[in-house]
Amino acid sequence: MGAHPPPESESHILYLSAADVDAARPSGSAFLATVAEVFRLRAAGQTELPPKLAVHPTEDGFLHAMPASLPALGAVGMKWIAAYADNGARGLPAIGGLIVLNAPRTGRVLAVMDAAWITVARTAATSMLSARHLARPRAASLGILGCGAQARAHIGIFGIRYPLERVHVYDRHPERATALAEESFGSTPLDIRAVATPREVVEGMDLVVTGGSITPVSRRTIEPGWLAPGAFASILDYDSSWSRGALEQLDLLCTDDTEQLELTRSRGRLAELPPTQADLADLVSGRHPGRTSDEQRTAACNLGVGLTDVAVAAVVLERAWELKVGTWLPR
């Protein structure tokens, strides 16, 4: 981190609530630049990213500990995040947790902050970074399966870069899709339509995002032939929504971090997923060319890495110092 901690940090820890994080979040361009820099540093071997540590207290939920270090950015810390697929029925958010940031030289805790916005935003930014290398530049249609926070974040960020003419959204709970279709995104109106079947968010669309629940029981909704030649898919829900046949039709499959994906596979997950050809560090560094023809079916199965959480949290913390937001807690 570039800015020096304020004097209060010697005797206190800064706590940033969800509202504080929202007040201190960086601009869209700065956010995307930070995420791109993370994977450039990853490609250069200048990061430390241990595998996620997971516990599974219930069938519908899990928690991940995600430590990461980026010396070049002066950022080190860990995210502790919970994902409970059935929390909607309980009137609770499906995802929630905290990020802890430490001083790299001494290890002292600098801040603890709510992780919800950073988790959602860095996921969408990672999808966008993948799309830069894997999607056609003039993609004009977007289909989204699952109408939660990730759907909103992806519509917002893809709508900035791509000339979207139509957006189809689907959810197992139709009222969620209808509510999403009625929302506004940015200054340019988007033609967002709630559709009745998963097929309508995949077939004929240039960009596809699947953000359903990650559960032990996979739904395998998407069938072979639905994803069009030339389309790009961002797979956020592991392989839960995709049949093996649909995945086998991909011409190019990438991920955010190969080591993490293979470890997850060794733990019995991602059984339907074919081998990946590259990760984001390969794409950002040019070690892999990404899409090489307009007809390729491409996809990114990004599992999320603590590097992006910690790097973005460090930017949020610096802005919080500057804006004087947050609550100082005694050590």
Image (cartoon, rainbow, N blue to C red):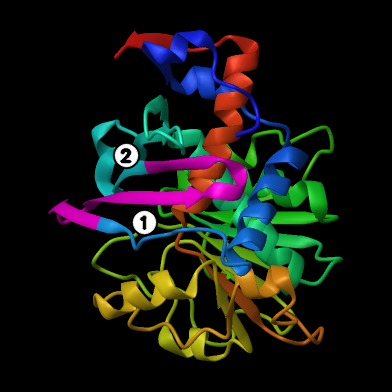
68 inside magenta stretch: yes
Q: What element carries label 1?
A: loop
Image point (63%, 42%), residue name: 181
Q: Can residue 194 be seen in this view?
A: no
- In the rendering, at what x and y percent does residue 41 appear? 63, 59
The residue closer to the viewer here, 178 or 265, is 265
Residue bearing mark 1: 213
Residue 270 relative to residue 227: left or right: left
Vertical comparison of 253 with 100: above or below: below
Q: Is mark 2 on a helix, strand or loop?
A: helix
Q: Quadrant of the N terminus?
A: top right
Q: In which quarter of the image is the C terminus?
A: top left
Vertical comparison of 170 with 3: above or below: below
Vertical comparison of 9 with 57: above or below: above
Residue bearing mark 2: 88
Q: Given the image, on which type of amino acid does mark 2 rest?
A: Gly
- In the rendering, at what x and y percent does residue 168 appear? 65, 56
Mark-to-mark CA distance, 1 and 2: 11 Å
- In the rendering, at what x and y percent does residue 200 appear? 60, 67
Q: Given the image, on which type of amino acid does mark 1 rest?
A: Ser
How many numbered marks are there? 2
Instruction: State which region is magenta.
Output: 54-78
Image point (50%, 69%), residue name: 257
Q: Label the magenta part by its dominant secondary structure.
A: strand
Decide: few, some or many residues near mark 2? Use Cα within 10 Å; few <14, some 14-19, many ≥20: few
The residue closer to the viewer here, 261 or 242, is 261
Place residue 265 in its image quadrant. bottom left
- In the rendering, at what x and y percent does residue 215 appear? 28, 61
Comes first in the chain, label 1 or label 2: 2
Image point (81%, 83%), residue name: 294
Is disc 1 in contact with disc 2, using a CB cutoff of under 8 Å?
no
